[in-house]
């Protein structure tokens, strides 16, 4: 679905990725996995190269480091040794990288259809969730029992999604790789739900015997 969004929103970017090989070669020890970025963060040239490509919405291949060189970025036939943002910009421009989407080429009906499907998926969750959650716990402890895990799930797991997904993309070079974060969490809920959550329709919700 997200690949389809790329296709219908920015076909020029999709075409650029299909015809242009991009790689970042560096030693693994020089590349770091950054989730929480702050004054304490130290970025190597490898980190800068990967971070830049990620922010441009570009997938790239990670290669082993070249002896004597900290990072080598290859865009098409252009090889850039070390980190040089201006040189990278010029190389991308020379290869025809679209700096922004051409609005005249956006397929609005298909984009709206995809977004509508996403909304349907959300309503499939939020439709039954209100009744489902309140039936999990007896009424006397329902507020705390429901509120605590619900907000941990939304606040921590949901709140960390953009940071974690972006770090995963930068680490792997695949702009769609960050989607594995919500996929794995969703799979975990299926497993936990099947193993530990029991049917509640026959229970007395005023009783502690759950």
Image (cartoon, rainbow, N blue to C red):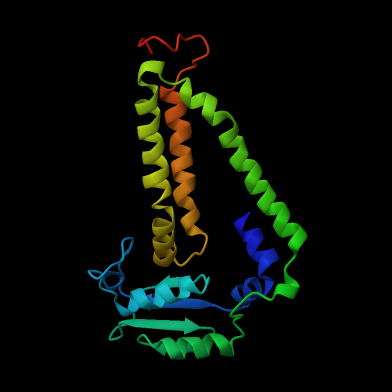
- Residue at the image position 42 percent from the left and 86 percent from the top: 85
The image shows a total of numbered marks equal to: 0
Is residue 17 toward the left or the right of residue 39 in the image?
right
Q: Is residue 77 visible?
A: no
Q: 92 or 160, which lies in front?
A: 160
Q: Can you say which quadrant of the picture contains the N terminus?
A: bottom right
Task: Please report the residue visible at 45 percent of the width from the left and 35 percent of the height from the top.
Answer: 189
Left or right relative to 142: residue 77: right
- Report the residue that reaches farthest toward the right: 109
Q: Is residue 64 above or below residue 171?
A: below
197 over 191 or under it: above or below: above
Q: Position of residue 106 (x, y in %)?
A: 72, 68
x, y percentage for residue 58?
52, 72
Say which of 77 and 52 sits in front.
52
The residue under the point 48% across, 40% down is 186
- Residue 21 location (% of width, % of height): 54, 77
Is any part of residue 122 visible from this angle?
A: yes
Which residue corresponds to the image point at 36% horizontal and 46% vertical from the top-left? 156
Residue 121 placement (x, y as % from top left): 62, 42
Q: Please say if 102 is above or below 1.
A: below
Question: Residue 16 lies in what quarter of the image?
Answer: bottom right
Task: Give the quadrant of the C terminus.
Answer: top left
Q: Is residue 24 above or below residue 141?
A: below
């Amino acid at each position: 679905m997200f690949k389809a969004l790329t296709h219908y929103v920015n076909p020029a970017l999709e075409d650029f990725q299909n015809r242009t090989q991009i790689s970042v070669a560096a030693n693994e020890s020089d590349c770091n996995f950054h989730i929480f970025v702050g004054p304490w963060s130290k970025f190597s040239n490898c980190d800068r190269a990967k971070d830049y490509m990620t922010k441009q919405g570009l997938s790239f291949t990670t290669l082993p480091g070249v002896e004597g060189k900290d990072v080598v970025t290859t865009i098409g036939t252009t090889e850039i040794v070390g980190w040089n943002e201006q040189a990278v910009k010029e190389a991308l421009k020379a290869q025809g990288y679209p700096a922004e989407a051409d609005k005249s080429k956006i397929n609005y009906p298909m984009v709206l259809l995809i977004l509508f499907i996403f909304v349907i998926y959300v309503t499939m969750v939020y439709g039954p969730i209100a009744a489902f959650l309140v039936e999990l716990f007896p009424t006397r402890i329902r507020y705390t029992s429901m509120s605590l895990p619900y907000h941990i799930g939304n606040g921590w797991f949901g709140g960390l999604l953009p940071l974690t997904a972006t770090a995963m993309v930068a680490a792997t070079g695949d702009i769609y790789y960050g989607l594995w974060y919500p996929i794995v969490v969703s799979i975990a809920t299926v497993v936990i739900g099947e193993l530990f959550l029991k049917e509640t329709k026959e229970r007395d919700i005023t009783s502690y015997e759950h």
